[in-house]
Image (cartoon, rainbow, N blue to C red):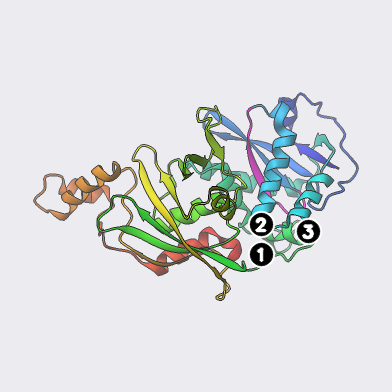
Amino acid sequence: MITLRCTRKVLDRLGIPADAQGFDAPTNALGDWYVNLLRAGREQVVMATSERSLLTVLLPARGMRERLVPELLRAVGAALRDLDVPGDVVAGELAAMQPMAFGPTASRSVLASMNNLAQMAEWRIRDGDSLVAIASWLGGVPMKALEGGGKGMVFPERAARHLLGLEGKRPPPRRLIRLRITLEGTRPAIWRRLLVPESIRLPDLHRAFQVAMGWQDHHLHEFAFGAACYGVPDPDGLDADLVDEAGLGLAELLARHGSGAFMYRYDFGDSWEHRVEVEGVEDNAQGLVSPTCTEGANACPPEDVGGLPGYLEFLAAVRDITHPDHRAMIEWAGGCFDPAAWNRERVNLGLKAAFALGA
């Protein structure tokens, strides 16, 4: 059992008195969860943080009166599975979190850490990142430790694993999936070859594709395995056929759909289609801990260039100094653009930064 220690505005939103009393002490490993509200444009987001590890999850605030507890359990379970926590340990922690009571916040140090996490989250929300991706990123941000008088630093994800009786740092995966991702319609082809953990889940695979290709993650995305599509659902339910990608593993979906290839779609306005081929599964002899790019060719198109037709027009302008739009396109692209430029070392540095826990 735990207490959801809520800020005053959360208690007001839930209709719970400010003097409500929670349980004396939590019975789970990660402790009570502190709950606050963040602003995401016109919408609000629920931010919940474990008092003992500072592991954080983010949820849509819509319908929180009725859905807060089940949505929090779902999000915590997905977050722990993404940390490679064994299923029986996840189930035990979720069971130990119940029942839940509500009460006011009790620790100033937890609130101070939450404020820091909230500032970072709001910055990423303004950039259009998904709530799952932001929460995963926050888990790899070093924070001041809450134990021992606030001395030292801790990674929330490592702290959570340690509290659950596991090694703080995730062990290297035993097996890797080798993928080739190609941007459809490009000649010469814009492509990358990646080694990803066999246990990788779709939110992390999206993050790896963004970094490896060179996109900026400014737009929506989805994975398509035949007719089945997975992504981040619209909170208004406008895409009823889209299955929530949170917690879903690549290996699980490959087995479910019996396919050696799938599509990764990015920016539904520019309509970039990437064909992803599964080239094989291999032992992790190198001890890789995060997605790694082994090969590739050619630069990613600029964001918002107008899809493949717009990119071809852009290339015609930047390659021809006599083109009437040459100077304007060069300036728009940041001063220079080489369509053949690509650097594997730079990509892998980006992947290590994006998956800091395993670096």
Dot placed on the residue nearer the N-terminal end, 1 or 2: 2
Asked if the residue under mark 3 is in contact with the one under mark 2, i.e. CB atoms within 8 Å, the reply is: no
Asked if the residue under mark 2 is in contact with the one under mark 1, i.e. CB atoms within 8 Å, the reply is: yes
Residue ranking furthest to the front: 258
Secondary structure at badge 3 equals helix
According to the picture, the residue beneath numbered tag 1 turns out to be: 170
Magenta residues (range):
51-62
- Residue type, mark 1 in image: Arg
Q: Is residue 23 left or right of residue 147?
A: right
Residue ranking furthest to the right: 24
Residue 7 visible, this angle: no
Secondary structure at badge 2 equals loop
Residue 100 drawn at (x, y percent): 82, 37
Label 2 Cα crowd, 10 Å radius (few <14 / some 14-19 / many 20+) = many
- Residue type, mark 3 in image: Leu
Residue, x 36% and y 37% (percent of image)? 269
Residue 336 drawn at (x, y percent): 24, 57
According to the picture, the residue beneath numbered tag 3 turns out to be: 163
The answer to which of 120 and 31 lies nearer the viewer is 31
Residue ranking furthest to the bottom: 285
Residue 20 drawn at (x, y percent): 85, 30
Q: Which mark is residue 83?
A: 2
Residue, x 53% and y 30% (percent of image)? 240
